[in-house]
Image: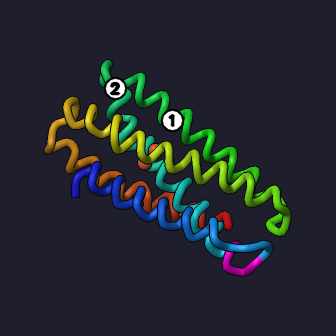
Amino acid sequence: MNIYERLIEDHGKQRGMAAGLAKTEGDSAERKRLFGEFYKELEAHAAAEEQTFYAELLGLADGQEKSRHSVAEHKTASDLLKELEKTDMSSSGWLQKFKKLKHEVEHHVDEEEKEVFPLARKLISAARANELGADFEKRKQAELEELAECA
Ligand SMILES: [Fe+2]
Ligand SMILES: [Fe+2]
């Protein structure tokens, strides 16, 4: 699986998880469980994406602007996740903040798929895109294991 197929697979998962979480209510076991999974998925995906795909794209002059923009959006999402973690799940503020995060994540993955990947396909060879897909898989697994230890 090349890097684009692999990242798009995760994006689909993230869209589904966000839609599921938006339907949960209050301080429920389901909200807690889904939020924990969403947190790990987003953080591990973003970290592995930066260490493999964006590290490659940042090294190419024409890829720098989009890479920096995406990495800044990862930081925005990560900050919102940490805020949500500290917010009382039974408060209305939690769902408001979550909806903001959902919007940010949807915007981000759409932008990667519609703008960043088409550019990267022009700059990165197909052979390299396959290697990056394998690298991403390994890095993401390592990130998930680290997050599981922290939890
Ligand atoms: Fe991303
Ligand atoms: Fe992504």
Picture coordinates of residue 145 (x, y %)? 52, 65
Q: Do the CB atoms of the residues marked 1 and 2 lie less than 8 Å apart?
A: no
Residue neighbourhood size for the residue with mark 2, other residues' Cα within 10 Å, grouped as few (<14), some (14–19), many (≥20): some
For label 1, the crowd category at 10 Å Cα-Cα, with few meaning under 14, some 14 to 19 and many 20 or more, is some
Tell me if 113 is positioned left or right of 94 in this view.
left
> What amino acid is at disc 1?
Val
Label 1 to label 2: alpha-carbon separation: 12 Å
The quarter of the picture where the C terminus appears is: bottom right
What is the chief secondary structure element of the magenta stretch? helix
The image's mark for residue 71 is 1
Q: Which residues are magenta?
A: 28-32
Secondary structure state at the residue bearing disc 2? helix
Residue 31 magenta: yes
Q: Which mark is residue 131?
A: none
Q: 88 or 151: nearer the eye?
A: 88
Horizontal and vertical percent position of residue 17: 53, 66
Where, by quadrant of the figure, is residue 56 drawn? Answer: top left
Mark 1 or mark 2: name the one nearer the start of the chain.
2
Q: Is mark 1 within 8 Å of ligand 1?
A: no
User: Quadrant of the rendered structure where residue 126 is?
Assistant: top left
Question: Given the image, on which type of amino acid does mark 2 rest?
Answer: Gly
Residue at 54% x, 49% y is 105
- Say the numbered circle drawn on residue 63: 2
Q: Residue at x 27, y 32 (%)?
A: 119
Whether ligand 1 has any atom under 8 Å from the Cβ at mark 2 is answered as: no
Which quarter of the figure has residue 137?
A: bottom left
* Whether residue 6 is situated above or below residue 121 in the rendered picture: below
- The picture places residue 1, in percent across and down from the top left corner, at 22, 58
Vertical placement of residue 84 versus 32, above or below = above
Residue 16 in percent (x, y) is at 48, 66
